[in-house]
Image (cartoon, grey):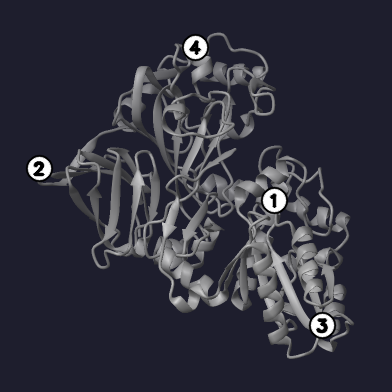
Amino acid sequence: MYEYRKNAENRIELSEEHLKDFVAGNEAVYASIIDRAGKASRGKTARVAIDGWYGVNFDILIRELTETARGAGLSVEALHTSDLFRPKEEIDRYRKTYETDDPSFGWVNETGVIEDVMDDGAIRALAARLRGGDSASDILVVYGPGAAVKALEAEYDLRIYADFTMQPMLWQMWGGTLIPFGTTRPDSDYYWKMYYYCDFYLLYRQKKNAFASMDLYIDAVDRGNLKMLGSGAYNAMIDNVVKQPIKQVKILQPGPWGAYRYHDLWEVEGLECNAWNELAGIELSVLVDVGAEELINIPAQNVMQRPVEMVGEYVHRTYPDLMPLQVWLDDGYFPEPVSWERSSMPIHNHPGTDYVKRNFNEPLGRYETYYIVESYKGSSTWMGYKEDADLEEWERLCRDSENRTVIPDWENYIRRWDSNVGDLFLIPPGTTHGHGGNQMILEMDTGPSVAGTEYSFFTYDFARNTWDDTKKTMTAPPMRMHLDHSFRNQKWIRENRVKDHHRARPLTIEGNGRFRKDRYSTLPEMPFHIERIFMEERAENDTEGKFMQIVTLTEGERVTIESLRDPSRRTTIERLQACIVPAGFGPHRYINESGRHAMVVIIRLKKG
């Protein structure tokens, strides 16, 4: 998985007072912490908590902080929170409820808190020690996830939160170097279900708790270049970010149908083929330029600290903490003709809200659309079963294969559709489908998970090898399928229904010759609208104070999105870049910066 940061900065203005509370560079950060701790402790042992997310290199942070303090003639005693947790065996038993026996998915820990896996006695003992000032050192630091739990937060003179973004944390998890709860060493057995279904929620609820009493915020993504803000400056930053369109650091990922159009568009070092490319969503980070020399890198979950401003009152009330929409760009360009078995996504489907609630305890199903952004010779989308296909036979073939043996006549079952730029495919839950290749797809979907968990039920992937990013070859074992979920979730939709109901058409709802706003036809079960705005120079739109939108520039070079109420609230996106327009942004204009026509495509919920 690769990040791409070009033009991802979100520029805001902080007051001079808040900018004075911004510190960049490890030495400056440590010196500031030591100075603040001394002032807060009033001559006694300074009691400092450094709480934080998985992925933060606490060992280096504490070692360098200690060295800086020693250089100032101060001593440091450091206590890692691993001693506050229950034994590993008990934590594993706790997680098991949420990992479940499902080989591919789990059950969301809806109410758990980090204290569930911590030792009450150890917390009480530490609280008593902090309260009594029992340390011979000048500074007593408690560091690691859970350092500032509710039972301890009042005992500190200084409370710090060290944050980390999703993608670098996943790199650690996949590489076996992530340090989870209750230990100071990496756990090579730790895997994604433990995180996405359990630990994420414990960390997230503790972060929200810690933010309420936090004195300092550290962006710890780059361990060699820490950035720190006081809590007032941090909250002012978030307040400003959610008042304007938000760009994110997009990710690109190789895979078995990985293609090559990205070579012409972006320079991504190390990426040899591109399958998935997420443009906007809860998994991605947000780069903020506060007017200092360094950028702040925060997880997208942090902007959800202002949920009503971000997603509107209805979504916040109905789906707490959820960013309900996401946008992807699926590559599909091959310089030479290739087979469908090389250019196509796996044949798959997605679950609806009832299914994910019943099986995974998630709040919202996966409802999807494919908008064709570019098409080349052979541009194709797979959707629905052929009218004469024997569906019982298809299920038997898939189960017999388990994606380990080829189904020679698979094309006799799945309908292929020729596609062109501007085509929109509606993909409600249970619809068999897949990107066929020779096109670029703007995939606009609901996001079912607060944690960003993916819900695609793979049925058949042509028994092909997938990508090995170490060897840079298509030699990794074939992907695992989700056959029980896939067939349990099937709606068995055939080609005539696809033709009559799933091939949406655009209807013009506004326009004057210089701009045009289209809304695509929809299905009752689809929870969002897809709209597009064509403009020569300018066009206007409105979130109405309740509809978060994700906007992607599909035609043209650069477009600026600017508030009509406050033109200083603005951002500029480039072709095939997306941004989130918060629900509270209100009336706004699009300004075509390229001098030629431009078009943006928009996803927004129907209900707000």
What residue is pinned by disc 1?
Answer: 195
**Residue 513 badge:** 2
Q: Is residue 573 left or right of residue 5?
A: left
Q: CA distance from mark 3 to mark 1?
A: 31 Å
At label 2, counting other C-alpha atoms closer than 10 Å, the crowd grade (few under 14, some 14-19, many 20 or more) is few
95, above or below 497, in the image:
below
Q: Residue furthest top?
A: 408
Looking at the figure, which quarter contains the N terminus?
top right
Q: Is residue 52 visible?
A: yes
Indicate which label's residue lies in the foreground, 4 or 2. Answer: 2
Residue 167, position as x, y percentages in the image: 61, 46
Q: Is residue 568 left or right of residue 80?
A: left
The three-letter amino acid code for the residue at tag 2 is: Gly
Q: Which mark is residue 13?
A: none
Q: Which residue is mark 3?
A: 130
Q: Mark 3 and mark 4: span between their CA atoms? A: 66 Å
Q: Amino acid at mark 1?
A: Tyr
On the rendered structure, is 118 left or right of 565? right
Q: Are marks 4 and 2 in contact (CB under 8 Å)?
A: no
The residues bearing labels 4 and 2 have C-alpha atoms spaced at a distance of 43 Å
Task: Kindly identify the amino acid type of the residue bearing the numbered disc 4.
Answer: Ser
In the structure shown, which secondary structural element does the residue marked by tag 4 occupy? loop
Q: CA distance from mark 1 to mark 4?
A: 37 Å
Alpha carbon distance from label 2 to label 1:
51 Å
In front of the other: 226 or 196: 226
Q: In terms of sequence position, does the residue under pointer 1 or pointer 4 come before the other? A: 1
- Could you tell me which residue is drawn at 75 percent across and 70 percent down? 147
